[in-house]
Image (spheres, rainbow, N blue to C red):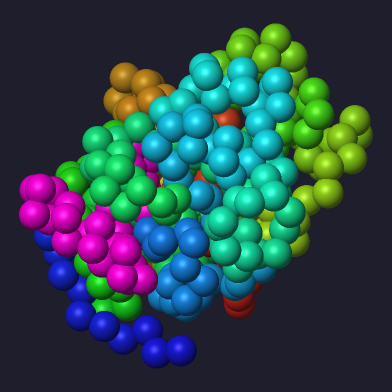
Amino acid sequence: MSTERVTRLLPATPAGLQAAARCLANGGLAAFPTETVYGLGADATNPEAVARLYAAKNRPQFNPLIAHVGDAAAARELVCLDAVAERLGTAFWPGPLTLVAPQTGNCGVCEIAAAGLNTLAVRVPDHPITRELLKALAKPIVAPSANRSGHLSPTTASHVLADLGGRIDLIIDGGATPVGIESTIVACEGDTAILLRPGGIARAEIERVLQAKLLDPLGPRCDYTLPPSAPGRLASHYAPRARLRLNARQVNPGEALLAFGATSPPDLEAAIAWLNLSATGDLVVAAANLYAHLRVLDQSGATTIAVMPVPTEGLGETINDRLSRAAAPRRPAQVA
Ligand code: TXA
Ligand code: MG
């Protein structure tokens, strides 16, 4: 399938949003900001559009997509939300939480969007532009992160243009995305909730609502069957060009440095470039900066980016998850 096309970069004006909604309605591919990262949208009910989306991203078709909808009522048309899922939806929607649940009988989302599974990932985004588009299209929109498979997720329109320019129809420029890291994905099965991907909502916040621990899909008390693509369970992902060296406490000559917190390593001058995720040690700020900072340091030409330790509490779990995947040995066919 040819992926070549002219990509228009449009402002987030009413005319821009109308053009994006028209593009989606006609089976096109439009990228737009959500509160987490930029998504590459297609009409979830149009199998040809969704096939083009997989092709534009170079994404293996066994890796299912998230369907975005305007509210919980629209989510219930797509998936069966049991008590646990309802509780999470009430607490966190609209927002950066994706729920995986069994599809309803008349879901309408095309089979390739769910990669043939009988479950579907659903999310109610909390960004005025995404919400406006969903209202205008009046159909679910599938939207993976708007990057080529395996690359860093985009948090600005220019990141999308750099990665997917010439492969998609248009990009709505709505500025930098506030959360900066993808949604948390939770699979709901009966009365259990399984954390498939840490994300923009911290584990502890979800466990507070559930008043129970989230299960680990690979853990001992969980018999959840992971799809072959299970979010990032395949190691290399979210990867810059440079290698990452994690938990660095010093800088080697020629390295770039991704710092965290108030104390920089003593040999900072050795770094050919450096940025701090948050000088005050704020993990929410660090999450918002992670991908953009990695991109800048990647462009410095360093072959290695040294990354200082980031604590694991709160959004630190998500940041460390992404860093360890970005550091993992690369695979030839990566899964975004
Ligand atoms: O914040 C986000 O979630 C962004 C924005 C654009 O909404 N989207 C995003 O989509 O990160 P994507 O496609 O890059 O990541 C979705 C993940 C994939 O790893 C996929 O394997 C997983 O969700 N997924 C989708 N459907 C699933 C299902 N039925 N069961 C298990 N995992 C599923
Ligand atoms: Mg992705």
Is 39 within the magenta? yes
Choose between 276 and 187: the one closer to the eye.
187
Q: Residue furthest front?
A: 106
Horizontal placement of 150 versus 221: left or right? left
At x 17%, y 52%, the residue is 17
Horizontal placement of 93 versus 329: left or right? left
Q: Is residue 223 visible?
A: yes
Horizontal placement of 45 versus 235: left or right? left
Is 248 within the magenta? no
Q: Is residue 22 above or below residue 321?
A: below
Image quadrant where residue 117 sits: bottom right
Q: Is residue 170 above or below residue 99?
A: below
At x 58%, y 45%, the residue is 78
At x 12%, y 56%, the residue is 16
Choose between 176 and 261: the one closer to the eye.
176
At x 32%, y 77%, the residue is 167
Horizontal placement of 97 versus 180: left or right? right
Q: Is residue 242 visible?
A: no
Q: Is residue 252 above or below residue 87?
A: below
Choose between 199 and 103: the one closer to the eye.
103
Choose between 242 and 93: the one closer to the eye.
93
Residue 189 image point, x, y percent: 78, 34
Residue 165 image point, x, y percent: 26, 73
Image quadrant where residue 219 sits: top right
Residue 329 image point, x, y percent: 62, 64
Tag count: 0
Q: Which residues are magenta?
A: 12-40
